[in-house]
Amino acid sequence: MFNIGGLFSGTSLLAGLDIGSSSIKLAELDENTGGKTLTCFSMMPLARGVIVDGAVVEKEALTAALKELFKKSGCKRKKVVVSISGTAVIIKKVSFPQMADDDLGVLIHDEAGKYLPFDDMADVNYDFEIVGENPFNPNQMDVIIVAAKKDIVEGYTEAVQAAGLTPLIMDVDSFACETTFEENYESEENETRILVNIGASITNINVIKNDTSVFTRDFPLGGDSITEAIAASLGVPFEDAEKAKIEGQGESDQLRESFREGLIVHADPVCSEIERSVDYYRSTFGFEEIKGLFLSGGGSLTPGIDKELERRLGIPTERVDPFKKIQLNKKLLKIGPADVLGPIAVVSIGLALRKMGDK
């Protein structure tokens, strides 16, 4: 995938560190002849305002939280893969004439400003990957360019380093979800599927075909917006609304009744943006059959949201199961059942699947 910021020397086994706007999650995998096993997973809430619009606003608070997370987790690896998303990162697909990787790297370096919306490319970290021949012109190849402002990347790396960790790879949430998905699911030739990661404040959409990302979009709505709508409509604290959304319970009959009958109404803005994104993809890339839509992230646990999206889109919809092929250490079930833990851990598992030397 994409190594914004570059690689350094070290072990091939890395920890995945998912830093979200409402929580931080850490995952470690072990691999042997029996396959891969999630041996360590830990998560803890992050105060609101530490991460805003994909950028680190309160660096010291993030560092303190990371130190606490590692102490609590018992995880041993200090070399980590981190990801970014939302407005912090630009993902753009561009077609170029067929050429060698080295020549393409020189061309993008010299002309990156033509393809990326930044005034000064000296302030930007970027990377690229050739995804294959352009389907409409065999003399062209499709290339995905990923870029982020250096101050955004440095905000994460400095906070992570201050916690005593070494960030080796900077990935992207959408592609971390894709890594987890492809590790666990088989695909057929020309099969198109859509991955939707509903985080607290950002939703990532990634359309994959032939195990290649062909369309991505992030938008600034997620699980928190659903919770805020519930809280506002009932006049209850955010924490009570969040508990009702996930667990289906609250401190009052009114809250429980609203949960049962009206929850999906509060999720309408998120569902509508997902629907618009899928409609745009279909209108731009043709109305090919989409085999399935796969949800992940804490927001995907909102009861009924999978059925609502399936109804709107006419696409079979389910939550990603990262444990179809990756084994789960039974001790981790104390955190929660596998069908709840799985969607929450998808990004961090995808990061932990990365190895030194990956592109």
Image (cartoon, grey):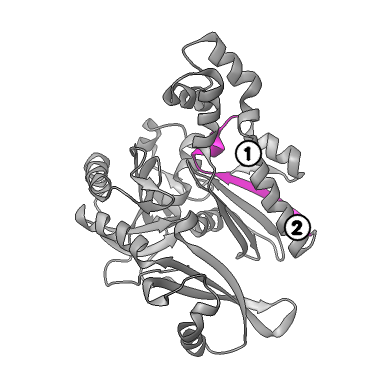
Specify the farthest residue to the right.
287
Q: Is residue 214 above or below residue 54?
A: below
Q: Describe residue 68's horizontal placement relative to residue 351 as left or right.
A: left
Which amino acid is tagged 2? Arg
Which range is magenta?
Answer: 288-303
Q: Is residue 97 above or below residue 325?
A: below
Instruction: Give the alpha-carbon distance from disc 2 to disc 1, as whole Å.
Output: 20 Å
- The disc at residue 310 is none
Q: Is residue 193 above or below residue 306?
A: below
Residue holding disc 2: 282
Residue 50 visible in the picture: yes
Which amino acid is tagged 1? Pro
Residue at the (46%, 38%) spot, across then down: 341
Residue holding disc 1: 269
The C terminus is located in which quarter?
Answer: bottom left
Q: Residues within 10 Å of mark 1 (few under 14, many from 20)?
A: some
Position in image of residue 271 (x %, y %)? 65, 40
